[in-house]
Amino acid sequence: MHPVKDRLDITGACRGLSGAEAVLKLRAVRANGDFDTYWAWHQQQEFIRNHQTRYRDQLVPTT
């Protein structure tokens, strides 16, 4: 049984190799019970990328 290959071979699927790898990594994180830790880290990284780096001295105004 090859569920990953089957999903990638679906006609009209737009998932390439990098997308498939990302999905497999998330499935592994979830299967290992580490999803909550990963999600907290991911949210922190997104905050830094989207907000903190856009302000001078990396200080985000609170008001």
Image: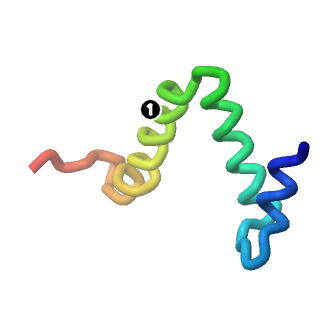
Vertical relation: 12 (above or below) 50: below
Q: Which of 49 and 6 is in front in this view?
A: 6
**Residue to which mark 1 is pinned:** 40
The quarter holding residue 25 reads top right
Residue at 87% over, 55% down: 5
x and y percent of residue 42 in the render? 50, 40
Q: Residue sitting at 74 percent across and 44 percent down?
A: 24
Name the colour scheme. rainbow
x and y, in percent, of residue 15 in the image: 73, 66
Above or below residue 2? Residue 9 is below
Residue at x-position 78% and y-position 66%: 16
- Mark 1 burial class by Cα count in 10 Å: few <14, some 14-19, many 20+: few
Q: Is mark 1 on a helix, strand or loop?
A: helix
Q: Residue at the far bottom: name it.
A: 12
Seen from this angle, which residue lies furthest front? 1
Residue type at the position of mark 1: Ala
Quadrant showing the N terminus:
top right
Q: Position of residue 3 (x, y in %)?
A: 81, 48
Can you say whether 43 is above or below 15 in the image? above
Residue 58: x %, y % from top left:
35, 47
The residue that appears at 58% across and 23% down in the rendered structure is 34
